[in-house]
Image: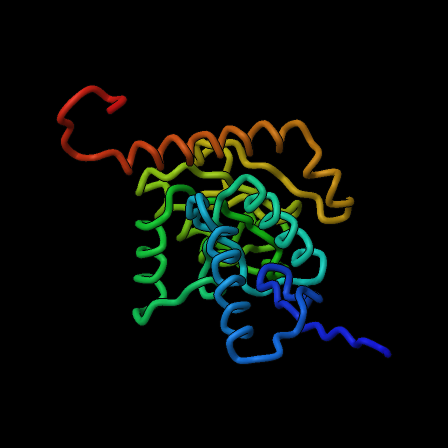
Amino acid sequence: MITIKKYYTHYNSRDGNYYLNERYPNSQKEYREAQEENGIDNAADMAFRIPVFLSHPSSLNTIQSRFLRRLIREIENVLLFPRTLPDTEQYPEKTLTNVRRLVLSSYGLIAVNMQQVFANYTQTNTGENLPQPSWEGAPFLQIEPSMGYQRGLPLLLIKEKGVNSVGVWNPAVTPFQIIEWDSTKPLDEFFNRVEWREIFQNWIAQVRSGYYYQTEPQYRYGPRDM
């Protein structure tokens, strides 16, 4: 006698892959029980994750997409939840209002300014001192970090090498160190750098400290350790 084991695939929303997970349910009752069990597992998997705003361009090439996926894994591995528009959530208001809502409901912001358009300048308003040709980043990579700074969120800024240093990405303006990512080198070269690990861990500590501070009760009726 040959016994055939049936399996059903489990979809992982984080990596977009299907996996052979458990025996295929033979009845509606087993199916409901399996769904409930997966729901609990998924909820537990997201437990204790503090929401942070991940600001990045929507137009990405293959290398930039790989970097972003690796960055998301790094964030999730330290039990933080990266939120971004419109990938993880979308509200019914206009874009700027959505950004404000996301900033107000997050406890940290990490922004990645990547190459979008290569600009070769031909004229200025004064007719002189033409800027050097350079890559420009996305416009919202100026707006979202600025709104996060106004809110007082811990900021972590990453800029792809070659992107022009204007606005909040000018080291002389921003009160934070900007980490540069060289897209021509392997990803591990960036994520294994001491500079990245130290700044990332410091940012994590600020996010967690801010989270615990913001979620303290407004009124106290006894010692702090009650």
Q: Is residue 207 left or right of residue 14?
A: left
The answer to whether residue 60 is seen in the rendering is yes
Question: Residue at 48% across / 65% down in the picture?
Answer: 36
- Coloration mode: rainbow
Residue 141, compared with residue 197, is above or below; it is below
Q: Quadrant of the C terminus?
A: top left
The answer to whether residue 134 is seen in the rendering is no
Question: Residue at 40% across / 53% down in the picture?
Answer: 143
Q: Quadrant of the N terminus?
A: bottom right
Q: Is residue 158 left or right of residue 104?
A: right
Q: Is residue 162 left or right of residue 42?
A: right
Question: Residue at 44% across / 50% down in the picture?
Answer: 53
Q: Position of residue 129 (x, y in %)?
A: 55, 47
Residue furthest out toward the right: 1
Q: Is residue 39 left or right of residue 72?
A: left
Question: Residue at 52% across / 80% down in the picture?
Answer: 28
What is the number of callouts on the image? 0
Residue furthest out toward the top: 223
**Relative to the observer, which residue lies in front, 32 or 97?**
32
**Relative to the observer, which residue lies in front, 1 or 33?**
1
Residue 127, compared with residue 203, is above or below; it is below
Q: Position of residue 58 (x, y in %)?
A: 54, 64
Q: Position of residue 39 (x, y in %)?
A: 49, 62
**Relative to the observer, which residue lies in front, 56 or 51?**
51
